[in-house]
Amino acid sequence: MSMDAVSDRESAWAQRPDWWKRAVVYQVYPRSFQDSDGDGVGDLRGVLSRLDHLAYLGVDVVWLSPIYRSPHADNGYDISDYRDIDPLFGTLDDLDALVDAAHARGIRIVMDLVVNHTSDEHTWFAESRSGRDSPRRDWYWWSPARPGHEPGTPGAEPTNWESFFSGPVWQWDEASGEYYLHLFDRKQPDLNWENPEVRHAVYDMMRWWLDRGIDGFRMDVINLISKRLPLSDAPERPEGGWADGSPLYMNGPRLHEFLQEMHREVFAGRSGLLTVGETPGVTVEEARLLTDPARAEVDMVFQFDHVGLDHGPEGKFAPQRPEPGALAASFTQWQDALADVGWNSLYLANHDQARPVSRFGDDERHWRESATALATILHLQRGTPYVYQGEEIGMTNAPFADIDAFRDVESLNHYAEAMARGSAPADVLLGLASMSRDNARTPVQWESTPTAGFTTGEPWLAVNPNAARISVAAQRGVPGSVLEHYRALIALRHDLDVVAEGTFTRLDVGDPAVFAFVRAFEGEELLVLANLSSDPRSVALAGADEWDAAVAVLSNVDSPARVSEAVAAPLAPWAAAVWHRRAEG
Ligand code: ISL
C-alpha cells in the first residue's frame, strides 16, 4: 500500500465511532509500573518516563488503574476523592502532563471509574454515617439488624450474602446503630444508585474528567450498581456459611436504565471515547444488550467465563488445571455470541488475575512458546485486545512462599478466614501462590537487575526473581522474543482490516486443543492455527492446500511457510502460526 493510502486509512479509522475495533489497549497498574522517586511505589511520573515503551509496543490506548485519593485498602479501588490524585502517585499536574505526552504520541488515556462503592473515608460516606437523619444517609445502603437478633452479633446481618473478599457484606456501625452494605472490603461501602443525587454526582465527576482531556472509562464492577429490591437472603449453601448473593446484586433490574442515563448525561455529543464495563458474572445475553451500539450503554464489557475455567469446586483458591481445549471453547462461545451485535473485549491478564502464562500456558517447559501462542489467539480474535503490563514480556507468577509476602486484601482476608476455620496453612498458601492477585502486581521487569529497574528503593511488593531472565531489556529488538511477538500482533491489527473487522469462524481440526480459526473481511482472509497444549498435536485441516498461496505472516516456531506442509506433521507444543490471503482479482 502507498503511504497516501495508509494515511487515508488512518484518518478514515480515526473518524469512526467504533475506532476502538482497530485499537489495542494497554493496562497500567501504576503502583507496580515504574517508580520515579525511590519510595518503592510506582507513580505518574514513572508512567510518563516509560511512554516510549508503550509507543514502541504500538498500543493505542492506556487504561490507568485508579490513581485518585485513596487510603489504599484495595490499592486505590477505594476512592476517597474522585477529583484529586493520591500523593503517592503525584498531582493533577502530573496527570495533565501524562495525558498531553500520551496524546502527543497518539495514545489515548482511559481512567478507571470505581463508582459501585467509595472508600469509607470519602466525605460522602462520612456524612452518610454521621447519623440516621443525615441528608446523605441514603447515598449508601443502611439497614437495621435482622428482626429478632441482637444488633452487631453474628447472624444479625440484614442478609446472608458473602463478600467478594470473604466474610459478610454487612458492617455494623455502632455510632448510628445500623449496618452498611459493602460487597467488597468493609472499607468499600456500596453507593446507592437508586438515589438520583448519587447518579448525578457521579455523572458530574465523569464530565469533569472528560473536560480535562481524558478519553474514556473502564467501569469497575459496573454490573453491580443495580441491586434487586428489597435486599433479601440468598439460598443457603449446602455446606452452610455465607451465601452467594450475586443473583440479587449482579445485572440487576435497573442496570440498563442507569447506563443509558449515564450515556445521555456524560457521553452524548462527545466522540473518540472508549467505554468498557467490567462485568463479573455477565452472560452472553446480557453482554449483547450492554454492548449493542443502538442501545447506547457501553462499547464493550469484560466477561469472566474464561478466567474462571481453572477455579475448582471449592473456588478460586482451590484451582484445577482446565482441560486443553477449554480456553478455545470458551472464547469461541463468546466470539459466536457477539458475532452480529455488540463487541468483545479480549483479555487474559489484568491486575486481578494470576499471570496467564502460568495459569493457561506452560511457564516451565514452554515459556516463550506458550506466552506467544496465548497472545496470538487472543489478539487475532474479533474484539479489542487488552495487554496488561508485563504480559508483553511473558511475566510469570511469583514464588510466594509465606503469608508475609502477600499484600492484597483479598489474599489476606482469605488467609485469615481459612485460618479461623482451621485449614492447614500450607494448603492455603499453595492456593494463594497460584491464584493471588499479587501475582499480577509484582513490579514490571524492565531490566535484569535485583529491583528490575522499577525503583531505586525497596519495592512495595517483591520483584519476581526471574527478572534475571525475563525483562524488557532482554527482549527489546530480539527476534522471536515475547515482546517482539506482541509488537507484531499489534502491527497486524493496524495493518490488516481483516483483523479489526473480520468475521470469526472456528475450524474443527479434529483436536479440541488446537485452536484453528479463520477471519474474513471483504475478500481478505486470515488463518490462525495454534496448539494450546504442551504435547505435539495433529491437525486435520480440510482443504489445507487451498491455503498454499497464502502468505505466512507470523509464527512463534520454525515452521514451513506453506499451510499444507505446516499441517503435514503434528504441531509442536504451543506452536502458533498465522497466514493471510486476499481473493484473486
Ligand atoms: O479478582 C477478583 C476476586 O477474585 C474478582 O472477583 C474481582 O474482585 C472483581 O473482578 C472485581 O474487580 C474490581 O473491583 C474490585 C477491585 O478489588 C478489583 O481490583 C477490580 O478490578 C473492587 O473495586
Image: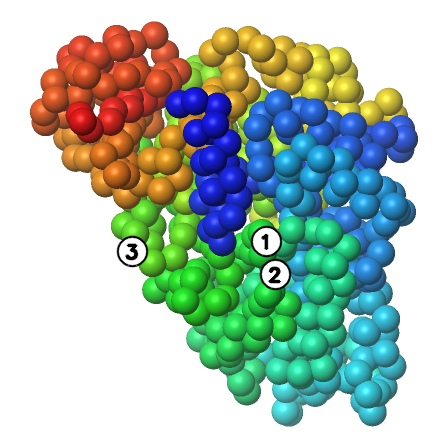
Tell me whether the residue at label 3 lies in contact with that at label 2, contact meaning CB atoms closer than 8 angstroms.
no
Q: The N terminus lies in which quarter of the figure?
A: top left
Locate residue 62 relative to residue 322 in the image: left or right: right
Question: Residue 339: x and y, percent?
Answer: 30, 52
Residue at 71% in and 65% down: 207
Tell me whether the residue at label 3 lies in contact with that at label 1, contact meaning CB atoms closer than 8 angstroms.
no
- Determine the CA span between mark 2 and mark 1: 7 Å
Q: Element under label 2?
A: loop
Which of marks 2 and 3 precedes in the sequence?
2
**Mark 1 Cα shell of 10 Å, populated few (<14), some (14-19), many (≥20):** some
Locate residue 53 relative to residue 396 in the image: left or right: right
- Determine the CA span between mark 3 and mark 2: 25 Å
Residue extending furthest toward the front: 4
Q: Element under label 3?
A: loop
Residue at 82% in and 88% down: 135
Is any part of residue 332 visible from this angle? yes
- Quadrant of residue 281 in the image? bottom left
Label placed on residue 270: 2
- Quadrant of residue 224 in the image? bottom right
Label placed on residue 340: 3
Discs 3/2, front: 2
Discs 3/1, front: 1
The yes-or-no answer for disc 1 within 8 Å of ligand 1 is no
Look at mark 1 in the image and give the residue it sits on.
273
Residue extending furthest toward the left: 543
